[in-house]
Amino acid sequence: MSQVATTAEPARWLERYGDELYRFALGRVTDAATAEELVQDTLVSALGALTSFRGQASERTWLFAILKRKVIDHYRRQARSPFIPLDLSPEQAPEAEFFRPADGHWRPEHYPTDWAADEASSRSDAALEQREFQAVLQGCQQRLAPQHLAVFVLRFVEEQPAVLICQELGLSSANYWVIIHRAKLYLRRCLEKNWFRPPAPPHS
Amino acid sequence: MPISSPLFNCQQATLLIERRADEALPLKTQVQLWAHLRLCPLCRRYAVQSVFIARQAQAAVDYRVPADVVLPAAARQRIQQALDQHSAE
């Protein structure tokens, strides 16, 4: 048994880092229960791996690195859930919802509208607006299929490289791009509907 | 997928917009995409909005959780128990 160089103090982890780890996790997953679970997994894993902590990093940095890994594992499990097979066949292609299959042109009902104009006209309290916008974005993200959500979060929130995401989720790079594209198409439409152009009252 | 040139195809062009954010496209493809974007205001909009969405998704981790949120007491207790159990093993 080798003695660790810098002292890790597991007995004080929860008190010292509990809230911070929890907030970190909560910002990355959709619900509190999952965030709590991730904090627990992180600390239990850390305890089991105490000998690998040699004090090169601070105890705090080390714990956050483990949590980050747990978040990735969480999305990998979700994306690999056997109950939702990934269907990339052209007949099922969701792209046909947005583009005419014949020539790949945008369907008129899905023409992207000009967001900048809408945004500028409604900008009052920037911070408040940012929070409200984030709530809408989160709602839209939650409506993505699990694989789409996993790829989107790993790429854009966790900022993992494409190669690593393909590896983790067992995707070919072609499938990876199709998923990124679809996720963006769905999110773009969802944001447009729910933030930039809230549904207008029905015309008479 | 039966898609030929991205020159006049918005589906293909928007897919390439996503790809080019991560990797260099072949020169010929770059030129075709550039030409498409010059001709297509809809895909130009998509390109701007796509970057906007990516930026907002990154910002999300800081905005979604107020700084005064704490680990709920029940969870804290449960986690402490799990840790105690593991320490004892």
Image (cartoon, coloured by chain):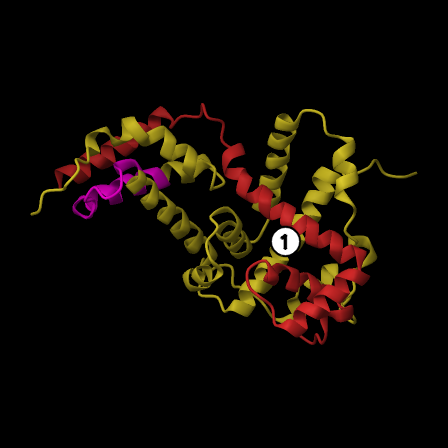
| Magenta stretch contains residue A57 | yes
State the image coordinates of residue B37 (x, y, percent, origin top left).
Answer: 75, 61
Instruction: Give, as a single range, the part of the protein colored magenta.
Output: A38-60
Of A127 and A147, nearer the camera is A127
Q: In terms of secondary structure, where does tag 1 sit?
A: helix
State the image coordinates of residue A35 (x, y, percent, origin top left).
Answer: 41, 38
Q: Is residue B36 above or below residue A192?
A: below
On the rendered structure, is A65 left or right of A143? left
* Chain coloured red in the rendered structure: B
* Chain coloured yellow in the rendered structure: A
Q: Quadrant of residue A140?
A: top right
Q: Which residue is mark 1?
A: A184
Query: Dot 1: few (<14), some (14–19), or many (≥20) neighbours within 10 Å?
Result: many
Q: Residue shown at 77%/54% (left/top)?
A: A110
Q: Residue shown at 60%/30% (left/top)?
A: A131
Q: Is residue A94 visible?
A: no
Q: Is residue A7 above or below residue B39?
A: above
Residue projecting furthest to the left: A1
On the rendered structure, is A17 left or right of A172? left
On the rendered structure, is A157 left or right of A92? left
- Image quadrant where one finds the N terminus of chain B: bottom right
Q: Tell me the chief SS of the magenta region.
A: helix
State the image coordinates of residue A143 (x, y, percent, origin top left).
Answer: 60, 47
Q: Residue shown at 21%/44% (left/top)?
A: A53
**What amino acid is found at the position of numbered circle 1 in the picture?**
Lys
